[in-house]
């Protein structure tokens, strides 16, 4: 998995500059990202504080973990059903 280049604090700092009136093209060039990246950040982190962004990240990580656990449990369940359905 690709490692994030910017932390939530840095992303929110860039977005605050954009809210202050800086042009997206100038921000993108100054921070070394594309304009599309800044628009994606605005869609995801727009209006959030640093603490809220960290909480969002923690919730996303927990959600991914729970999805993985559910998938493993469903796989085990399907295997047991298959094993029990066979006539020995």
Image (spheres, grey):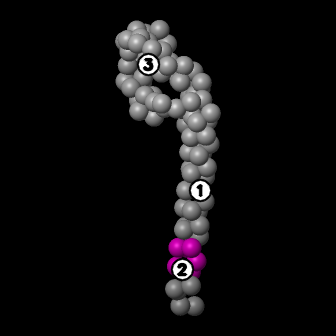
Secondary structure beneath label 3: helix
- Whether the magenta-drawn stretch holds residue 47 is answered as no
Frontmost of labels 3 and 2 is 3
How far across and down, in percent of the image, does residue 13 sit?
A: 54, 19
Q: CA distance from mark 1 to mark 2?
A: 22 Å
Estimate the x, y position of residue 66 in percent, counting from the top left.
59, 56
Can I make out residue 16 in this image? Answer: yes
In 3D space, how far apart are the residues under numbered discs 1 and 3 (Cα atoms)? 35 Å
Residue drawn at x 60%, y 29% as measured from the top left: 50
Label 2 crowd (10 A; few <14 / some 14-19 / many >=20): few
What residue is at 56 percent from the left and 30 percent from the top? Answer: 49
Span highlighted in magenta in the image: 77-83
| Secondary element type, mark 1 | helix
- Mark 3 — residue? 19
Mark 1 vs mark 2: give the one in front.
1
**Mark 1 / mark 2, whichever is N-terminal:** 1
Q: Nearer the viewer, residue 49 or 64?
A: 49
> Are the two marked residues, 3 and 2, in contact with CB atoms closer than 8 angstroms?
no
**Do callouts 1 and 3 mark residues in contact (Cβ within 8 Å)?**
no
Q: Which of pointers 1 and 3 lies earlier in the amino acid sequence? A: 3
Q: In front: mark 1 or mark 3?
A: 3
Name the residue beneath numbered marker 1.
Answer: 66
Q: CA distance from mark 3 to mark 2?
A: 56 Å
Question: Vertically, is 86 above or below 25?
Answer: below
In primary-sequence order, the first of circles 3 and 2 is 3
Give the label on residue 81, or none.
2
Q: Residues within 10 Å of mark 1 (few under 14, many from 20)?
A: few
């Amino acid at each position: 998995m690709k490692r994030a280049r910017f932390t939530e604090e840095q992303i929110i700092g860039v977005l605050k500059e954009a809210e202050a009136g800086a042009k997206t093209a100038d921000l993108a060039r100054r921070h070394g990202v594309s304009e599309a990246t800044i628009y994606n950040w605005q869609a995801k982190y727009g209006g959030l504080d640093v603490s809220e962004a960290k909480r969002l990240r923690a919730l996303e990580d927990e959600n991914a973990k729970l999805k993985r656990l559910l998938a493993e449990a469903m796989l085990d369940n399907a295997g047991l059903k298959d094993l029990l359905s066979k006539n020995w």
